[in-house]
Amino acid sequence: MSDKLQKIIEERGPIKKIGVLGMGYVGIPAAALFADVDKFEKVLGFQRNSASSGYKIDMINAGESPLKGEEPGLEDLLRKVTGSNKFECTPDFSRIAEMDAVTLAIQTPFENPTDLIPDFGALIEGIRNVGRYLTPGTLVVLESTITPGTTNGMAKEILEEESGLIAGEDFALAHAPERVMVGRLLRNIQEHDRIVGGIDNTSTERAIELYSPVLTKGKIIPMTSTAAEVTKTAENTFRDLQIAAANQLALYCESMGINFYDVRAGIDSLKGEGITRAILYPGAGVGGHCLTKDTYHLERGIEIAGKTPLDYPENADSIYVLARKVNDFMPNHMFKLTEDALASVGKSVKGSKIAMLGWAFINDSDDARNPPSEPLYDLLIEAGAEVRIHDPHVLDYPNVTIEKDLNAVVDGADVIAILTGHSDYFKLNPADIKTTMGKDKPVIIDGRNVVDPTKFIDSGFVYRGIGRGDVN
Ligand code: SAJ
């Protein structure tokens, strides 16, 4: 604990002004919630006035949310905190110098997962901007999901280089990873426990002061910055691993001609103290901005933050990376099911009309970051199929046409393939769909266990479903 930093912070007094870099799915709700705290005087949202995202500045200052999709409570809160001038969005990064605390919520994709090379370009630019205007006693918090060792490594170095100040001596530095899901951003920030990891105790204490007032049901869980980085990357890696375990079991069930969901109910029935059997759900693939990359951040953590050589079985793959491979394989399996089903009615993928239902990576959302539907679409096009895409929520996506009229998309199709579990698709009526397809032997491929196979088979469909070896 540096007494010097402690002293500077005491002289500076309680946190009053907060800056948030990155006006996206994490930064905007976080900034609005900070601004809604009485004891915080002012919140600035820093947004580059770039061609691609500069439009957000005026929208936010007009109390409107530039985020796509339903976000309960966000627009009302934005109108409230911009109306009272507690929250303002600005492209003027020099005002960082006025802030007592600055958070960074900037995307951290991977450039090349195989070689574990992240694309930290946007994050580094953000950290440099903070470093340029950093003043003694300021708290800097990384909220982005990052490779373990980044806060106390790359981020600290850049901030010190740009500011000439010393982390832990002149300014506080911490990692407090976001844990939000689209469609419930505000609630997730208020109700999930908050992991707070400083590079030292003073930094952790200052970060606790920042986040405590925003929490309603959630509590603060303090730890070191590296432990916080591992907590975040590992919780997503474990979820991805659980999904991969379900996907692998589903593939086994198909091979053995049994129903995954019977097995799942069976396994899930073993209850009692200490017995947790969190079996997740198999499906057409894993998408989104988080599970598709956080495993690689964790893996890279060994390189960046490893202090002693890793002791691990020789020539054995990381089970986490293997899980990524299994989940990335599922669109290929959807293609295989489509090919098999068409062959069973004497057709091939080439020349067949395929109606893909669902482009979003998650149900009832318009979020189409890394959608599992895309690799399947590419495989079908490559194989010479004619593909039309329906999604009730996603407006547009590069290089594909997303349609809103379900009947038009299904009209004349040989196959309908369900990729996303949107609520609309649970209401599909087999007889109506068959009529619209106008085929004697229409095919349905269910990648999200949305439809009742019996109803479709009884209506004359050839059915294939992930994990449904009993009826495929
Ligand atoms: N999926 C399955 N089977 C399942 C659950 C999900 O195939 O049983 C698929 C979904 O269809 C989707 C993908 O996985 O394509 C990701 O789904 P998700 O429900 O994990 O959604 P994310 O990625 O938006 O949310 C995750 C969450 N992480 C954990 O629960 C550990 C969320 O809490 C995080 O805040 C978020 O990542 C993030 O931002 O890191």
Image (cartoon, grey):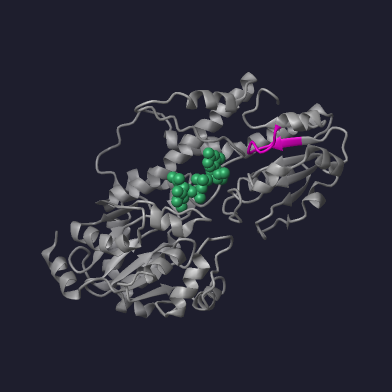
Counting every numbered tag in the picture gives 0
Q: Is residue 376 above or below residue 45?
A: above
**Residue 451 lies in the magenta-colored region:** yes
Q: Nearer the viewer, residue 111 or 104?
A: 104
The picture places residue 81, in percent across and down from the top left corner, at 43, 74
- In the image, taking residue 301 as reference, residue 339 lies left or right, namely right
Q: Residue 95 sits in which quadrant?
A: bottom left
Q: Is residue 45 above or below residue 436?
A: below
- In the image, taking residue 257 as reference, residue 28 lies left or right, namely left
Q: Is residue 116 above or below residue 171?
A: above
Segment tinted magenta in the rendering: 444-452
Quadrant housing the C terminus: top right
- In the image, taking residue 64 as reference, residue 375 lies left or right, namely right
From this viewpoint, which residue is outermost toward the left?
Answer: 3
The picture places residue 395, in percent across and down from the top left corner, at 67, 60
Instruction: Determine if residue 411 is in view.
Output: yes
Q: Residue 418 sits in which quadrant?
A: top right
- Which residue appears at 44% of the width and 62% of the height? 106
The picture places residue 247, in percent across and down from the top left corner, at 55, 32
The picture places residue 151, in percent across and down from the top left corner, at 31, 57
- Which residue appears at 11% of the width and 64% of the height? 3
- Which residue appears at 38% of the width and 71% of the height? 35
From this viewpoint, which residue is outermost toward the top?
Answer: 256
Instruction: Determine if residue 145 is in view.
Output: no
**Residue 350 lies in the magenta-colored region:** no
Quadrant housing the N terminus: bottom left
